[in-house]
Image (cartoon, grey):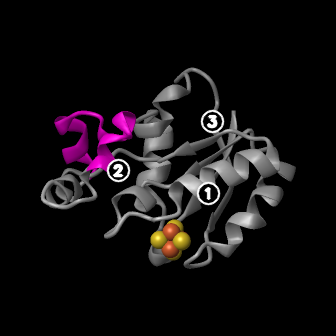
Amino acid sequence: MRIGIIICDRYRTCGGGKCLRSMRERAGAFDRYPKDEPLELVGYSTCDGCPGGNIEYVPEEMIKNGAQAIHLATGMVVGYPPCPHLTYFKTFIEERYGVPVVVGTHPIPEKYRRVHQGLDSLPVLEAAPSLMATAEIRRTYD
Ligand code: SF4
């Protein structure tokens, strides 16, 4: 399986450690892929900043390089606030490029879940059960 990852530009300096680790562990949104089959990252980029102009273009390069699915990184879900364009991005890429889009990459760190607990953004987290994982797993991603 080959995938591309698009991250929120607010976190453009991120080294990608949690995403790459969770790919290896098949944790979070990667729990859908069998552990005994190779999972290859063929593209990694940002949305290029609000309102996400790169969403229009960067999937093409990822797909040319073999991407069979595109993941919108967990940072779009757990940012403060979560990306307001998440649903639009998913629908646009799937309609325009015909590849499945998965919301999320690594499990939600417990420290982020705790803050969202008191915010209106909690339903965005709760809509992604594979990212919520378990409390034990969330703590390992703090
Ligand atoms: S909030 Fe959304 S549109 Fe804005 S920088 Fe982050 S991912 Fe891009």
Identity of the amino acid at label 2? Val
Percent x, y for residue 32?
51, 27
- Picture residue at 47% right of the left edge, 52% below the top: 19
Looking at the rendered image, the quarter that the C terminus falls into is bottom left
Task: Give me the residue at 24% from left, 44% from top.
Answer: 138
Q: Along the polypeptide, which appears first: circle 3 or circle 2?
A: 3
Check residue 135 in the rendering and tell me which mark sits there, or answer none.
none
Give the image location of residue 116, x and y in percent: 20, 58
Q: Relative to 55, is 8 on the left or the right?
A: left
Distance of label 3 from label 2 (alpha carbons): 27 Å
Q: Secondary structure at mark 3?
A: loop
- Pointer 2 or 1: first along the chain: 1
Along the line of sight, which residue is nearer the eye, 129 or 91? 91
The Cα–Cα distance between marks 3 and 1, rounded to whole angstroms, is 23 Å
Q: Quadrant of residue 60?
A: bottom right
Q: Residue at x 35, y 44 (%)?
A: 107
Which numbered dot is residue 89? 1
How far from the left and from the top, in percent, is residue 94? 72, 45
Relative side of 17 to 63, left or right: left
Q: Earlier in the sequence, mark 3 or mark 1?
A: 3
Disc 1 CB within 8 Å of nearest ligand 1 atom? yes
Would you name the residue on which mark 2 appears?
A: 124
